[in-house]
Image (cartoon, rainbow, N blue to C red):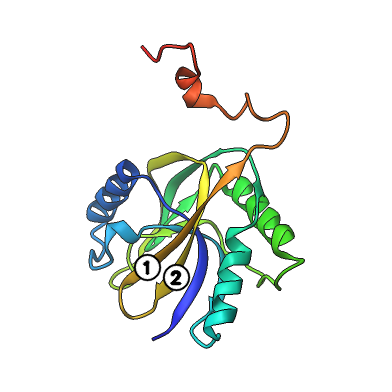
Amino acid sequence: MTERLYLIIRPPPDQRRQLDARRRMLELDRSYGAERFHLTVQPFGGIDRLTPAKRAALIAAITAIAIDAAPFRIVLDRVAGRQLIAGDGAAAIARLRRAVAASLAPVIAVPRYGGRPHVSLAYHGPRRAAAPVDAVAWTVREVRLIGSLLGRGRHIDYAALPFRPRQGELFGSLGDRAGQLPGRSSR
């Protein structure tokens, strides 16, 4: 069994339903489960050949990093092939990739990855010409470390890595959470 390690952004449940609706509208193959929709931030490669101790050390190193980033909005608003492509938020993902690589540089060699930010809706069947679609958007507040078991249709969810807002960005990053502040009503 081949297991590959990735840092991903997982869409919230409402957005997964919207992504699945776009997939149906585009008449794309639905054999890939909507619960596995994700946007890859950083692949780390195969870990199945590592000793259990090295695998545990790698996972511990990745989950120990502090990601200095403010929450940001991602907007998927174009189809190309079998993917929905990010418009707004693509630059923030590039910054996030650099922050992850910088945080891990003292511990591991991070593979270079410059793939355009996207969510794959299908892996088989027809491809669609590039075209705008109704946007699917959400605010990203964390990344997740997963292991993908290739050929088995399964992800192992190892950890959530929430963003740690940089000093001076705390109030700017509250956005839609302002109603959740102590002493404030959300009504």
Percent x, y of residue 88: 54, 42
Residue, disc 2: 147
Q: Nearer the viewer, residue 168 or 14?
A: 168
Q: Earlier in the sequence, mark 2 or mark 1?
A: 2
Q: Nearer the viewer, residue 51 or 142?
A: 51
Circle 1 — which element?
strand
Q: Nearer the viewer, residue 91 or 151?
A: 151
Left or right side of 71 for 186: left
Q: Amino acid at mark 1?
A: His
Residue, disc 1: 155
Q: Nearer the viewer, residue 160 or 16?
A: 160
Q: Which mark is residue 80?
A: none
Task: Give above or below for 53 relative to 19.
Answer: below
Left or right side of 60 for 86: left
Look at the numbered discs 2 and 1 and tell me whether their residues touch, using CB distance below 8 Å: yes
Left or right side of 182 for 32: left
Left or right side of 31 for 72: right
Q: Amino acid at mark 2?
A: Gly
Residue 60: name its quadrant.
bottom right
- Name which residue lies at 28% across and 66% down: 32
